[in-house]
DNA sequence: TTATAGGGTGGTAGCGATACCAAGAGAAAC
DNA sequence: GTTTCTCTTGGTATCGCTACCACCCTATAA
């Protein structure tokens, strides 16, 4: 019955109202709010008083339309749930906020077509820039980005040909390094549990790194040593058991996701297997958990927070006027050797 | 020297351009895009063709200004990092997206004053509604919400007097129930480790629930059985050790945060203490981890995902025209009895 | 045949801010 | 004292879209 409800506040006060009550022109109010230094002390005080009196909130939608500038950054991650992304998102959010920007967030669920829809939607909202976790994109995404010219940062991997800017580590090098590390420790039969490979360039790269390292170690690149598993504790446990069933001589397992690794570790605890006595366990991504588990777990430390921070800094600089240049920052990674290997 | 860069796409195509190329009026384009059913087949085809030809993206900023309607929901959580919130955020994001809304997210870092600043900022962006995790707010926040009249959902606790709508469980009842549960299992000296209490109504409520249950169990409400600890694995371990130092006879510890509980559990593993033989451990919030740890951990299952989903559904309904009514949904909780108690 | 209705289309006037330019007031230079 | 310059302030024209109303045309009823 009520029909469409009014969407906005009842007492909609606008800048011209404030101007009238302060006895100045709207432009002076606008300036007093955005660039107080260009307005005389007296005017500023009048404006401030009126603003406070009515708890006036400038309408940034109108401001954006008029100035053709927006202060909202769009972010697309595969999953908001995943704590790895959460670390990065937090860092991005903090840097943006410190510079007066906001974050519009969306998750693509690892689907390239959904990414496309989200990019369109965010660009329609006229976000001033984008952060994408993917580094492989639909043609339409690439076209839209090129056409609109918004600054973009890709963060999930180091693309050979970034859309614009990229801040990441090399999934390939990281997986290769950990595998080599295991080899150096003397393990010869090293299994690899990968996250789903479909539409996921990062997983693909990690597997490639694993195989490359095996070759470099002079070990056979046996495809049955590789298992694909969706993330999850049980899945990690399952994967390890299946690997060991196929390869009873397996002496180490490298998990491309930390939850998988911990799941496997718990399974070993349950069975009373010594880690690394019976089998060594290595993980990807330094979840806090891994440092506290018993035994503590060897892993790759990826500076997720730094990725977020630097991505946001690049964007902010660019939005504040830095000249566009293709940047490709490799934040690197670090092998953290612990008790489990 | 490039000065301020242009913020928007170079090839800025607008609705009137599309209209011209399609040989129709701008209004017809607008309608064809938003309410295709009100436009004739022929017109629609002409418009669609032009839209595709230029990959036209309607400017939603202009649309929002004109229609005084926005499709962005603002969300403020204490911390994006925390996986509990992440679950809720994901659910919210999914429901909103399915209905064509977007999410602008910010974190308050548990500070009420920051919440105020963020609420102002989000309202200045003219979000069409708000989701707040806090249930205690500054006066200014309450005033702004009342004045603008945007729909609001509070999710962190069941407030006695909600701003508008609330979807949550009772922190008080949950803590009370778990404490009672421990009493029922025969534990007599039950420690309680709380998260920081400052500016945090949820922590406060949980502690109150703990004390209430103790009283009901006829156990002494000894304040030295309560320890405050910031979240974290080590902090959980520390807290347990300190509690046991003060109370060597401690037979159970109830942790108001799951990470604390797991930290304590790991510490027990490290010392070779039997859980629950030496001390029982109970947790708050059903992190996946708790179901897989060894031993599995008794905890409170809070339907975080459901909280997010129902919050978003309430908002969407209201935004789509449902009449405003104060709603207060108690999603409840569940005690999950596992090996650790 | 004329009246009445109703779907489909277009014209016009904002939405609430900012950009840009013009103009007034003093201060500094001649 | 006049000119020039700088510093503030104000007026006006958008920004790109949608609401609202007017109009036209066809269809059905009287």
Image (cartoon, coloured by chain):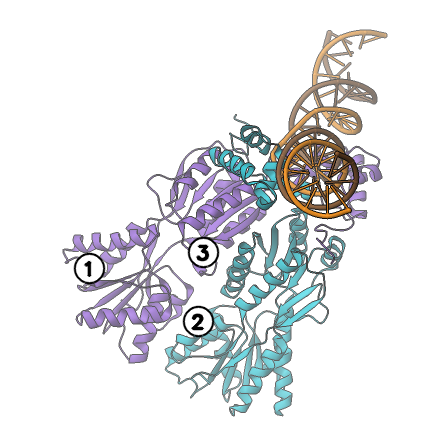
Chain colours: A purple, B cyan, C brown, D orange
Q: Which residue is drawn at 32% across and 41% down?
A: A160
C23 vs A203: above or below: above
Q: Are marks 2 and 3 on the same chain?
A: no
Rendered residue at 55%/75% (across/down): B256
The chain identifier of the residue carrying mark 2 reads: B
Answer whether residue A218 is visible to the viewer in this image. yes
Element under disc 2: helix
**Residue A310 in view:** no
N-terminal-most mark, 1 or 3: 3
Q: Where is residue B189 in the image (x, y as percent from the top left)?
A: 54, 88
State how far apart marks 1 and 3 are (Cα).
30 Å
Query: For this view, does A84 lie left or right of residue A6?
Result: left
Question: Do marks 1 and 3 share a subunit?
Answer: yes
Q: Position of residue B37 (x, y in %)?
A: 58, 46
Q: Tell me the mark number nearer the camera, choosing from 1 and 3.
A: 1
Q: Which of A35 and B84 is in front in this view?
A: B84
Query: To which residue does mark 1 refer?
Result: A223
The residue where tag 3 is placed is A85
Q: Quadrant of residue B165 in the image?
A: bottom right
Image coordinates for residue A70, horizontal then vertical, percent:
59, 40
Q: What element carries label 3?
A: helix
Callouts 1 and 2 close, C-beta under 8 Å: no
């Amino acid at each position: 019955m009520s029909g469409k409800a009014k969407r906005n506040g009842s007492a909609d006060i606008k800048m011209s109202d404030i101007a009238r009550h302060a006895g100045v022109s709207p432009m002076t109010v606008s300036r007093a709010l955005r660039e107080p230094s260009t307005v005389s002390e007296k005017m500023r005080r009048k404006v401030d008083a009126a603003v406070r009196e009515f708890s006036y909130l400038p309408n940034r939608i109108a401001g954006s339309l008029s100035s053709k500038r927006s202060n909202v950054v769009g972010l697309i991650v595969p999953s908001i749930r995943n704590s790895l992304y959460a670390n990065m998102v937090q860092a991005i959010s903090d840097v943006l906020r410190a510079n007066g920007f906001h974050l519009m967030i969306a998750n693509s669920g690892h689907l390239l077509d959904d990414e496309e829809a989200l990019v369109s939607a965010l660009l329609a909202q006229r976000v001033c820039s984008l952060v994408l976790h993917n580094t492989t994109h639909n043609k339409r995404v690439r076209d839209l980005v090129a056409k609109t010219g918004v600054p973009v940062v890709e963060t999930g991997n180091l693309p050979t040909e970034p859309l614009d800017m990229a801040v990441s580590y090399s999934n390939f090098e990281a997986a290769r390094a950990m595998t080599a590390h295991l080899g150096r420790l003397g393990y010869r039969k090293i299994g690899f549990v990968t996250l789903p490979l479909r539409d996921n360039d990062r997983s693909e790269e990690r597997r490639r790194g694993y195989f490359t390292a095996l070759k470099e170690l002079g070990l056979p690149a046996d495809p049955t040593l590789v298992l694909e598993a969706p993330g999850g504790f049980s899945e990690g446990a399952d994967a390890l058991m299946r690997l060991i069933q196929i390869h009873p001589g397996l002496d180490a397992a490298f998990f491309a996701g930390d939850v998988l690794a911990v799941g496997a570790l718990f399974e070993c605890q349950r069975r009373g297997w010594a880690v690394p006595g019976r089998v060594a366990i290595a993980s990807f991504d330094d979840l806090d958990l891994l440092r506290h588990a018993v035994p503590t777990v060897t892993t790759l430390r990826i500076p997720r927070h730094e990725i977020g921070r630097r991505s946001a800094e690049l964007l902010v600089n660019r939005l504040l006027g830095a000249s566009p240049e293709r940047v490709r920052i490799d934040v690197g990674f670090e092998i953290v050797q612990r008790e489990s290997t």
